[in-house]
């Protein structure tokens, strides 16, 4: 067994274990962290497949951004395990049915008939100087230009829709408009300078004790 | 010597190289904390630490010994495993990112094609240390600090990533060595000039990304005591401290590499070729890195802390639009071969 094969089994085992933990852990934060681990080991598997760009981008996008936001939301949830488990028996038959259908479907698609070296011969390993990123970029922006552009427009529509759905103006919240805030001028907006004639020159008090008396005189 | 080196097994060679990077880095981290206290001291007309050793030179050693001797207190209802795992998750990416960092022409541990992407991916993992620390401490202040940090880092990572997209468009490569060589010429052909807005965005996002003042709301002591590491003590706390400073050094070194020509001399190569110390070399990279490291300290001593909503506004509504516009400008400049940067 070569070292690469050994690495593959190590990462594959960790991925499966982490994926199992994601759906069995009670604590949602633990589940999300195991999902992160599953992503990291999947990225390692992709790198073993010579798909370095995809592997690094999986870490960058899913682990570095998406899962951080996920964790952000999950940490604030107060999950009540008892209510979650309340309908377990009631939904069990339906759930089992869905599981069986999904398992059959997956078997048909990724079953042993569709795998193996005779169905897909192993591709020749690429040289060390082949830039994965460059090859992928060239393909995406020449051969697959229209699918890429259509996918990006669909994503843009999803972003706009999500923002529109969550955007609501609540008149009761006190909102600071930064552009108005920074444009405040000292002159008219913040203080009013009142010009007034000075009164007669008041003699400076000789002692500190004469202060209160002084004040009364000026008034 | 060379034969002895070549006789060593590859694993030992790589381990020695890793030690040659990490040990000076940790020493630099220790003296960066000393420099910070001294520099901010002088900016505020104080002397700074001056008791341990000559002019306080042994202060970081004394601090390290003190932190190692202290007890690591684990809060009663904390998630123990995650609580102890968090500092390790914080420091690991800060050290692992150096694997692809070129210190001089060809002087790099792993010369991979997607070096920039690798560094971006690893620096995006550092936030997990903070979030896990905040959550596992089972403390309100720590959780609030983690929340602030998560939102802030996600916001600034996008601006930072776009700034790096500008660099890779300008250099036409993701390999860090190639990016430096694409800037060769003199101080005016380095990328800081054609990518000036991205340079500014990168430096400021770097300060935000490392949770340093004026963006240090994750530990804002006036509001949430010490934020995410409020429950940490002893060596566990020291690891967070190390991670923060190692990240600052990494961001400074990357700025020097991506925008300030790395190890290239600021003078044209025709003037300085072969001249001692003026020629290209590691010392230029070190000098530039130290300059950007000094900026971090200078910022801290100069600016008051940002208000939280202003940080979010700056990241999402100012920096991201600036970077998107400038990527378009750079792309056009590259296509139309704008001299002197892309005339070749």
Image (cartoon, helix red, strand yellow):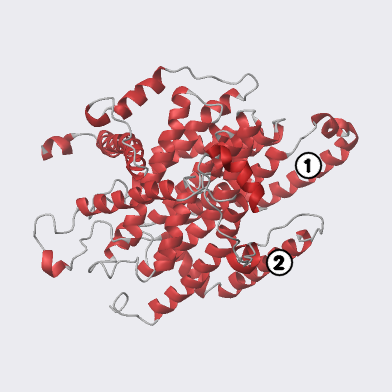
Q: Which mark is residue A99?
A: 1
Quadrant of the image occupied by residue B75 = top right
Label 2 secondary element: helix
The chain holding disc 2 is A
Q: Nearer the viewer, mark 1 or mark 2?
A: 2
Residue at the spot 35% in from the left edge and 65% down from the top edge: B192
Above or below — where is B19 with respect to B193? above
> Picture coordinates of residue B274 (x, y %)?
9, 60
Q: Quadrant of the C terminus of chain B?
A: bottom left
Give the camera-side residue of B79 and B7. B79
> Picture coordinates of residue B94 (x, y %)?
41, 41
The chain holding disc 1 is A
Q: Quadrant of the N terminus of chain B?
A: top left
Residue topped by disc 2: A160
Q: Seen in the image, is B289 located left or right of residue B212?
A: left
Disc 1 to disc 2, how far (Cα)? 35 Å
């Amino acid at each position: 067994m070569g070292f690469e094969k050994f690495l593959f089994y190590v990462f594959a085992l960790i991925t499966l274990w982490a994926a199992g933990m994601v759906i069995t852990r009670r604590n949602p934060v633990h589940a999300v962290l195991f999902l992160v681990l599953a992503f990291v080991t999947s990225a390692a598997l992709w790198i073993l497949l010579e798909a370095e760009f995809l592997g690094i981008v999986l870490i960058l996008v899913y682990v570095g951004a998406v899962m951080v936001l996920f964790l952000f939301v999950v940490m604030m949830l107060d999950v009540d395990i008892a209510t979650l488990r309340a309908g377990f028996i009631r939904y069990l038959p339906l759930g089992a049915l869905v599981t069986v259908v999904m398992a059959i479907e997956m078997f048909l698609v990724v079953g042993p008939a569709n795998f193996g070296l005779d169905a897909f011969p192993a591709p020749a390993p690429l040289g060390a100087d082949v830039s994965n990123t460059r090859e992928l970029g060239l393909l995406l922006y020449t051969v697959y230009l229209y699918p890429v552009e259509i996918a990006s427009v669909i994503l843009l529509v999803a972003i706009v829709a999500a923002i529109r759905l969550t955007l609501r103006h609540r008149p009761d919240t006190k909102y600071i408009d930064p552009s108005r805030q920074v444009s405040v001028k000292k002159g008219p907006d913040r203080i009013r300078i009142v010009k007034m004639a000075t009164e007669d020159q008041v003699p400076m008090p000789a002692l500190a004790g004469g202060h209160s008396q002084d004040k009364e005189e000026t008034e | 010597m060379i034969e002895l080196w070549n006789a060593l097994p590859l694993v030992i060679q790589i381990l020695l190289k890793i030690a040659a990077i990490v040990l000076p880095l940790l020493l630099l981290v220790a003296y960066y904390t000393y420099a910070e206290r001294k520099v901010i001291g002088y900016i505020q007309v104080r002397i700074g630490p001056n008791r341990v050793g000559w002019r306080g030179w042994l202060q970081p050693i004394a601090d390290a010994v003190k932190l190692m001797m202290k007890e690591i207190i684990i809060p009663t209802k904390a998630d123990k495993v995650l609580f102890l795992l968090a500092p390790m998750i914080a420091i690991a990416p800060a050290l692992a990112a150096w694997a692809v960092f070129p210190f001089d022409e060809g002087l790099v541990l792993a010369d991979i094609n997607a070096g920039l992407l690798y560094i971006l991916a690893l620096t995006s993992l550092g936030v997990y240390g903070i979030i896990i620390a905040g959550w596992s401490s089972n403390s309100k202040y720590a959780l609030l600090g983690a929340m602030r940090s998560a939102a802030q880092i996600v916001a600034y990572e996008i601006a930072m990533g776009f700034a790096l997209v500008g660099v890779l468009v300008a250099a036409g490569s993701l390999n860090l060595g190639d990016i430096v060589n694409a800037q060769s010429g003199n101080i005016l052909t380095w990328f800081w000039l054609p990518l000036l807005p991205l340079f500014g965005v990168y430096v400021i996002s770097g300060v935000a990304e490392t949770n340093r003042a004026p963006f240090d709301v994750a530990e804002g002591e006036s509001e949430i005591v010490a934020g995410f590491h409020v429950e940490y003590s002893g060596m566990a706390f020291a690891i967070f401290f190390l991670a923060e400073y190692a990240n600052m050094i990494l961001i400074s070194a990357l700025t020097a590499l991506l925008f300030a020509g790395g190890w290239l001399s600021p003078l044209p190569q025709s003037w300085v070729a072969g001249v001692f110390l003026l020629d290209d070399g590691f010392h230029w990279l070190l000098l530039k890195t130290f300059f950007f490291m000094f900026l971090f300290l200078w910022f801290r001593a100069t600016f008051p802390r940002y208000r939280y909503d202003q940080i979010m506004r700056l990241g999402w509504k100012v920096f991201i639009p600036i970077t998107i516009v400038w990527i378009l400008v750079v792309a056009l400049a590259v296509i139309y071969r704008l001299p002197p940067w892309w005339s070749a």
